[in-house]
Amino acid sequence: MSAKQFAAQMKAMIEEIKANGTAAIYCDNLIAYLAEVQNTPEAEPSAIQIERYKADLQNWIETNKYNHEGCLEMFRSVVTSGQAAIKSSFLLNGGAAVAMLAFIGHLAQFRPEKVPTFAACLMPFAYGVLAISVTSGFTYLSQWCYASTRPWMRKVGFAFNMLCILFGLSSYGFFLWGVYDTNHSFIAYA
């Protein structure tokens, strides 16, 4: 029942009460008020306005869905890139450490006095492997904290994320340090 229908029904009821002799509710005033309500234009939307609203709502839903999918794909891209960076750093430092171990093992047979010089070159690569291993662990903790609904846990997740970046970059720094030391050791060896 619309407001106009209600007003018409209420007006009819009050007119009937008034016709029966009840005047205690100031029927004239109430009837005048209800007539005024009945004559005011109703704010019911037209069919075109309803369809326009439905179209706008559907557009809003599709836009939000598109934005959500875009954010989800960006997140997947970031995770994939991070995993690739962790793997490449692990391969760089781990491969260099294995190569240095093989070289030191061979060197120990022919020039054992040079082993300590090259053994020192192994340490930056080992630190790089350690740093990237810690990065991998912090990545898990970061994602675990981000998955929480508590705001303070998301802040902790952000801190772990920053630590991941710091340790990841430091593993590349350890690799460069190891390459530099190894280069100088080879120059001194010759």
Image: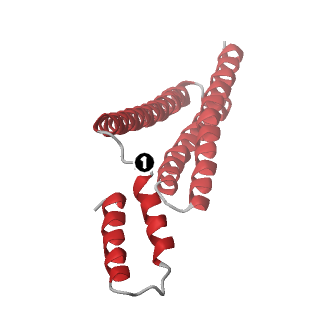
Classed neighbour count for the residue bearing mark 1: other residues with Cα under 10 Å, few (<14), some (14–19), many (≥20): few
Q: Quadrant of residue 52?
A: top left
Q: From the image, which quarter does the C terminus lie in?
A: top right
Q: Nearer the viewer, residue 90 or 54?
A: 54
Q: How is the image coloured?
A: secondary structure
Asked whether the viewer can see residue 115, the reply is no
Residue 131: percent from left, percent from top: 59, 42
Vertical placement of 174 versus 3: above or below? above
Residue 130: percent from left, percent from top: 56, 44
- What residue lies at 34% left-to-right and 82% top-to-bottom? 17
Q: Nearer the viewer, residue 7 or 120?
A: 7
- What residue lies at 54% left-to-right and 44% top-to-bottom? 135
Residue 161: percent from left, percent from top: 58, 45
Q: Secondary structure at mark 1?
A: loop
**Number of marks in the image?**
1
Asked whether the viewer can see residue 34, the reply is yes
Vertical placement of 183 versus 106: above or below? above
Three-letter amino acid code at the position of disc 1 = Pro
- What residue lies at 57% left-to-right and 55% top-to-bottom? 154
Q: Nearer the viewer, residue 134 or 157?
A: 157
Q: From the image, which quarter does the N terminus lie in?
A: bottom left
Residue at mark 1: 41
Residue 88: percent from left, percent from top: 47, 28
Q: Quadrant of residue 68?
A: top left
Q: Nearer the viewer, residue 56 or 79?
A: 56
- What residue lies at 42% left-to-right and 34% top-to-bottom? 67
